[in-house]
């Protein structure tokens, strides 16, 4: 019945998509084709919302294709190309509502600074800017906003959500076992406030990222860090106050801001070249033959066992398949492994590491950490190859946690009962309607301690160290990469460029070779892919067409996401970060 209904839905969606495609084709023919791009002008780039790591598949429908979210590699390569393109005379950056971590922010900011070094002007126009927006715009040589806007620059805050009181009302008790005193993921379900260990770990992360923010702004605005810290204590700023404090350069509408850039670059104010259109040049470049292709292999999301588990998940079977294919692909000379993951399933993490170590034996490999590479995300990074991270990257969290709910109280409230039979003394160890027995706790403790010991040994082996060197950095503690205490966990502070330079050396590519960083697995045609997989159609095309709104779009619901992640609901031992950290 499910397949039948899916088939019907696929038929309707296919018909709708076909009509849209035909409509665009007719409109294009009637209009005589697309409007000509200006012969020269300024590049217009709008950054807002989330930014991913691996680019989405191509959608052969102009409007939908233009709605594809930006990725770090696309923004970086667009700015690199535009810096040397004589047709591009400057950059107009519109930014507001950035919703990504401090690793991605550092990479994009570095790309903006590199573009600026080309001598072409870079102007930023802010829309309801937050701290991350301003951090990025501080790399530009001019910043403006409208007079009635607000610069929400007031420092940073980190907080955790606790569900114990809610669970108590429902009659649900979470039972948590963990290895490592900082591996306090379960505290969200068993406590109502931070433990001393949580405060210590989160405080260090907050201080580290605050330093990244302050130093970046100070450098960009040619002020001292002390000045910026003092200003931050007076925030947020109405636009007039931001201008008075020289945090911005002008109060104006976006049309005036564009006109100012046009005047500076000696082009018409209407000579804006859309970065989304310009992106096509980058994607076309990925399809060309090259003697120096470097695979940009992305591991992004929660780590789970299985395949085709949807967006935002590293499905172990799929990822290992891609690694296996990459290992045999003669076109790619080396691999830059890009990790943005808080971890997940312990067994899947181990399988991923094994596959990556096999890949590393065949092709040179370097690891680049994004916003977060912690717990299982860090586990898969310790291949024995160099690890690069940003100052604000969250990493470590070397520990193991097991969680499961005891639903007896809830069942009693709703009048639900269960009865059953068993063969074997321990057959009922994992039933969900009674507390863990002493035997169950002992068995679980053995497994957790063994998994933690394995984690430590894998890290020690990959980092060419002794377990005794790693253990003080473990205990489940998450670190910010710039923390001097945690420098043993990574090799160098740096972004994609630094990792790529190291990879060129390891791959022994000739000096004249210009390596091309290309996302792997290769992009596909989204429409043909969708209609070969009904489940993928519902999960991917539906939200794109507005058929379903992601439940986490609501900021209140987003707080519940860590509690309902698939990795936890599946149960089992997890090499997973103790919490989802969002410093804003």
Image (cartoon, grey):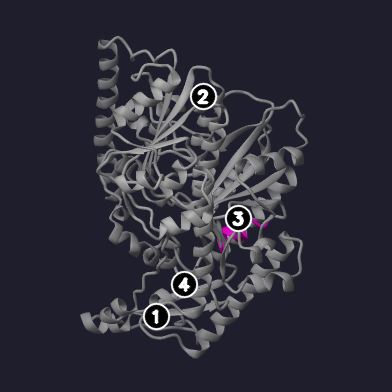
Q: How dense is the environment of label 4, judged by Cα within 10 Å: few (below 14), some, or many (20 and up)?
A: many
Secondary-structure class at tag 1: loop
Distance from the alpha carbon under mark 2 to that under mark 4: 43 Å
Q: CA distance from mark 1 to mark 4?
A: 10 Å
* Magenta segment: 375-382
Q: Is residue 78 above or below residue 543?
A: above
- Mark 2 closeness class: few <14, some 14–19, many ≥20 residues within 10 Å: few
| Residue 303 seen in the figure | no
468 inside magenta stretch: no
Residue under pointer 1:
191
For image coordinates 60% across by 45% down, the residue present is 495
- From the viewer's perspective, is residue 371 above or below residue 436? above
Q: Give the structural element (helix, strand or loop) at label 3.
A: helix
For label 4, the SS is loop
Q: CA distance from mark 2 to mark 1?
A: 52 Å
> Would residue 516 be visible to someone looking at this image?
yes
- Relative placement, left or right, of 491 versus 158 is right
Q: Where's residue 243, x and y in %? A: 35, 43
User: Which badge, 4 or 3, is on the more N-terminal residue?
Assistant: 4
Tell me how far mark 3 sits from mark 2, CA to CA: 30 Å
Q: Nearer the viewer, mark 3 or mark 1?
A: 1
> Counting other residues with Cα less than 10 Å from the Cα at mark 3, is it few (<14), some (14-19), or many (20 or more)?
many
Which residue is identified by label 4? 185
Q: Nearer the viewer, residue 249 or 480?
A: 249
Q: Earlier in the sequence, mark 2 or mark 1?
A: 1
Report how far apart the C-alphas of labels 4 and 3 lie in the structure.
23 Å
Query: CA gap, disc 3 to disc 1?
Result: 33 Å
* Residue 454 horizontal/vertical position (percent): 66, 70
Mark 1 or mark 4, which has the lower sequence index?
Answer: 4
């Amino acid at each position: 019945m499910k397949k039948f209904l899916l088939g019907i839905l696929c038929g309707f969606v296919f018909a709708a998509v076909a009509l849209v495609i035909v409509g665009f084709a007719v409109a294009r023919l009637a209009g005589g084709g697309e409007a000509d791009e200006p012969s020269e002008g300024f590049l217009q780039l709008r950054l807002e919302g989330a930014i991913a790591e691996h680019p989405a598949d191509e959608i052969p429908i102009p409007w939908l294709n233009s709605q594809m979210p930006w990725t770090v590699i696309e923004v970086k390569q667009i700015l690199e190309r535009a810096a040397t393109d004589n047709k591009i005379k400057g950059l107009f950056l519109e930014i507001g509502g950035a919703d990504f971590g401090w690793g991605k922010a550092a990479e994009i900011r570095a790309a903006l600074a590199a573009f600026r070094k080309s001598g072409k002007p870079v102007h930023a126009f802010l829309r309801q800017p937050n701290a991350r927006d301003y951090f990025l715009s501080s790399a530009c040589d001019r910043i403006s906003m409208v007079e009635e806007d607000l610069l929400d620059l007031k420092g940073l805050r980190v907080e955790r959500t606790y569900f114990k009181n809610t669970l108590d009302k429902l009659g649900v008790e979470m039972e948590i076992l963990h290895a490592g005193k900082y591996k306090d993921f379960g505290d969200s379900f068993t406590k109502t406030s931070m433990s001393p260990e949580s405060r210590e770990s989160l405080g260090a992360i907050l201080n580290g990222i605050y330093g990244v923010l302050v130093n970046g702004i100070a450098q960009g605005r040619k002020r001292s860090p002390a000045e910026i810290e003092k200003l931050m204590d007076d925030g947020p700023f109405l636009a007039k106050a931001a201008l008075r404090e020289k945090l911005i350069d002008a109060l104006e509408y976006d049309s005036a801001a564009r006109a100012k850039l046009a005047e500076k670059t000696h082009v018409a104010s209407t000579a804006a070249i859309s970065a989304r259109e310009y992106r096509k040049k980058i994607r076309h470049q990925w399809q060309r033959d090259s003697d120096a292709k470097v695979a940009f292999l992305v591991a992004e999301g929660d780590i789970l066992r299985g395949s085709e588990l949807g967006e935002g998940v590293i499905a172990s079977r799929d990822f290992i398949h891609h690694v296996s294919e990459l290992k045999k692909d003669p076109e790619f000379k080396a691999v830059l492994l890009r990790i943005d993951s808080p971890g997940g399933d312990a067994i899947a993490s181990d399988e991923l590491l094994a596959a990556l170590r096999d890949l590393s034996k065949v092709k040179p490999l370097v690891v680049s950490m994004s916003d977060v590479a912690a717990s299982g995300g860090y586990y898969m990074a310790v291949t024995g190859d160099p690890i690069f991270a940003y100052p604000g990257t969250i990493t470590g969290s070397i520990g193991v946690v097991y969680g499961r709910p005891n639903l007896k109280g809830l069942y009693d409230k709703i009048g639900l009962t269960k009865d059953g039979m068993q063969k074997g003394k321990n057959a009922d160890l994992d039933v969900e309607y009674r507390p863990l027995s002493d035997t169950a706790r002992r068995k679980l403790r053995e497994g957790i301690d063994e998994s933690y010991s394995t984690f430590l040994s894998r890290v020690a082996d990959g980092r060419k160290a002794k377990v005794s060197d790693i253990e003080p950095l473990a205990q489940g503690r998450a670190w910010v990469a710039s923390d001097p205490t945690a420098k043993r966990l990574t090799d160098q502070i740096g972004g994609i460029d630094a990792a790529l330079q190291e990879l060129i050396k390891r791959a022994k590519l000739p000096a004249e070779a210009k390596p091309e960083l290309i996302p792997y697995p290769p992009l596909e045609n989204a429409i043909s892919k969708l209609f070969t997989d009904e489940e993928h159609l519902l999960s991917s095309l539906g939200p794109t067409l507005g058929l379903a709104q992601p439940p986490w779009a609501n900021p209140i619901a987003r707080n519940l996401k860590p509690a309902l992640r698939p990795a936890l609901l599946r149960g089992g031992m997890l090499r997973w970060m103790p919490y989802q950290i969002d410093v804003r």
